[in-house]
Amino acid sequence: MITLFDRFNAAARDLYYSLEASGLLGSSSIVLEEDGGLPAGVTSPYAFFCGMEEGEGEPLYFNEVPLPAFWQITGTNTQGAIYNDSTKQATIHYHEPKHLRLVQTVEWLTPSQEVYRQDHYNQYGWMFARTYFNAEGQAVSKHYYQASGEEVLVENLQTGYHLLNWRGKVYPFAKRTDFYLFYLREAQVDLSAIWYTSLSSPFVLSYYLGGDGQDVLFWQEKIGQEIPGNMRLILSGSAKRTKKIVVQDKESYEKLLQLVSDEEASMISYLGYLYPRHSENAQTKEILILTNSDQLEGMAVLVKELSDYQFHIAALTEMSPRLKAYEEEAHVTLYPNIAPRQVADLFEKCSIYLDINHGSEILSGTRQAFEHNLLIAGFENTVHDQRFVLDEALFSPDAASHLAAWLRGEEIQSRVSRQRLESEEATEAAYQALLGEEGQYVQAE
């Protein structure tokens, strides 16, 4: 059995972890879109043909990008830039987490500051692909390379045509699907079951592969007013390999059941995700706030009304005078330019995470807090990921005093337990019951 993803986004990572934790991961995990940063144990067709599965080396730091003599590189925690005197020549984009400044792509610019080429770097520090753009700014072709610099694959991004140089032969593929099918057979993966997450390329591969199979669609998107066409093929039995649809969002599951017949409903199950538990709640009066700005909703009220709590405010950059002013309070500690090790220590030490900063989230703070079993609270206009926050822990922006009173209320551990429960977290037993060898394709309760 293999797991097959379009791209390795957050939902894909959650399913990967859930299957791994349940002992159901299968022999191969394959991502069709290669970003150069796939974790160990996850591969792609491009990684296979470029030799990245056996890759070694370190990621390229932003100031290590090869340059002509006398050109310069500058960088922040979000992106870098390359200059020749005062003229910008390229933009450097980082792999996640961005504050580590590890190069993912370098976009080279024309004199009019239009992108004409994009160099892609992998986790081993070498350029594995190069994308070319036309005068209208459209990506037209992508070339893939081995570590030696030898070109192994050319992809026409307009038509899907692939030209592969593989083991002394040249293979043309008119469509991307044909290339993927060739990869699946050449890689000799176990195709007895394909567990896939998209009705686009992964479904098409399952559909055209043919033969016997015990395939499963893990539906990770929202359901609209109509059932998607390819899902209709599954429900009608036309996609013969796919035997089951597992919906991973409870609301979408309930809506889908309203759109199908009783017979079709027998093919559909609901199953959430498993989430890591890095630590248990320390049950201390220690509050953590991660921020990339000095705009902290209700902060003045919270500091005043929770004077017997210790606040830890951390940022990846220097802090403004507005934030530094809080350091005058004995129960507030600031951490400008915080190091990753310090962040990890604070998640172990603190019991409460306040998601009260405006702007973008840093270090996936809410998710990390959930996985460390911190009690999470915030305001309706600041919380970045409501999946992991109790409904009762969301307050209107003018209710900072109510938030402070709520934190003083019920014992923390009972709230953290409810926080896990309301996230609709699944269990290993639920995965085994639905998908394991003994209970494969059994309808979940």
Image (cartoon, rainbow, N blue to C red):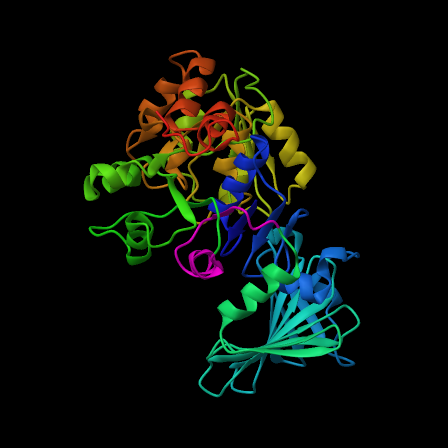
Q: Is residue 400 above or below residue 167?
A: above
**Residue 255 locus on image (x, y percent):** 23, 40
- Location of the N terminus by quadrant is top right
Residue found at x 68% / y 47%: 40
Does residue 196 belong to the magenta stretch?
yes
Q: Of residues 99 and 148, which is closer to you in this image?
A: 148
Label tally: 0
| Residue 35 in view of the camera | no
Residue found at x 39% / y 39%: 248
Q: Is residue 52 above or below residue 138?
A: above
| Residue 103 in view of the camera | yes
Q: Is residue 222 above or below residue 374?
A: below
- Name the side, left or right, on which 405 lies relative to 148: left
Q: Of residues 221 and 180, which is closer to you in this image?
A: 180
- Name the side, left or right, on which 357 lies relative to 397: right
Q: Splitting the image into 4 quarters, where does residue 93 fall?
A: bottom right
**Residue 254 locus on image (x, y percent):** 26, 36
Residue found at x 41% / y 27%: 302
Does residue 75 belong to the magenta stretch?
no
Residue found at x 53% / y 27%: 329
Q: Of residues 378 and 329, which is closer to you in this image?
A: 378
**Residue 53 locus on image (x, y percent):** 72, 56
Q: Is residue 321 above or below residue 274?
A: below
Please report the bounds of the magenta region as a residue range: 190-210
